[in-house]
C-alpha cells in the first residue's frame, strides 16, 4: 500500500477526523467490512501496531500496519 492509499484508508477509518484511530473506530471499520465474527481478533491484531501504547493508532503506527 502506498502512503497516499494508507492516508486515504486512515481518513476513512478515522470517523471523527482527530488524526488518531481509536478502538471504537477500528471496530466500526471492521464491522462495515463484514468482519463481525472476528471483530475482537481483528481489533487486537490492529492494536498490536500501537507501539507507544496510548491505545490509539496515529498515522505512523497505522502506516506500519498496512505497508
Ligand atoms: Ca479518531
Ligand atoms: Ca499509539
Image (spheres, grey):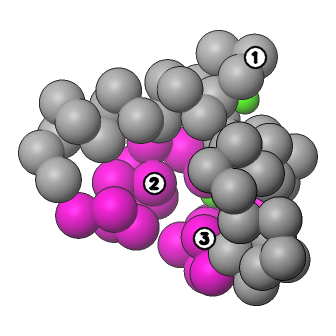
Quadrant placement of the C terminus: bottom left
Which circle marks residue 16 in the picture?
1
Question: In the picture, residue 6 is in which quadrant?
Answer: top left
Q: Please state the extent of the stretch shown in magenta in the rendering.
A: 45-67
Image point (60%, 34%), residue name: 13
For the residue labelled by badge 1, is the local secondary structure a helix, a strand or a loop?
loop
Residue labelled with disc 3: 46
Q: Position of residue 30 (x, y in %)?
A: 69, 55
Image point (60%, 70%), residue name: 46
> Ligand 1 falls in which quarter?
top right
Q: Examine the rendering and report whether any part of residue 44 can be seen.
A: no
User: Sequence-wise, which precedes: disc 2 or disc 3?
Assistant: 3
Position of residue 53 relative to residue 55, above or below, is below
Does mark 1's beta carbon lie closer than 8 Å to ligand 1? yes
User: Sequence-wise, which precedes: disc 1 or disc 2?
Assistant: 1
Classed neighbour count for the residue bearing mark 3: other residues with Cα under 10 Å, few (<14), some (14–19), many (≥20): some
Position of residue 40 in the picture relative to residue 6 (left or right): right
Q: Position of residue 2 (x, y in %)?
A: 12, 45
Image point (54%, 44%), residue name: 58
Amino acid at each position: 500500500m502506498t502512503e497516499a492509499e494508507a492516508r486515504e484508508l486512515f481518513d476513512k477509518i478515522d470517523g471523527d477526523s482527530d488524526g488518531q484511530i481509536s478502538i471504537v473506530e477500528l471496530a466500526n471499520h471492521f464491522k462495515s467490512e463484514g468482519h463481525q465474527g472476528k471483530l475482537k481478533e481483528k481489533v487486537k491484531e490492529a492494536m498490536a501496531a500501537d507501539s507507544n501504547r496510548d491505545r490509539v493508532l496515529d498515522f505512523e503506527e497505522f502506516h506500519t500496519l498496512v505497508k
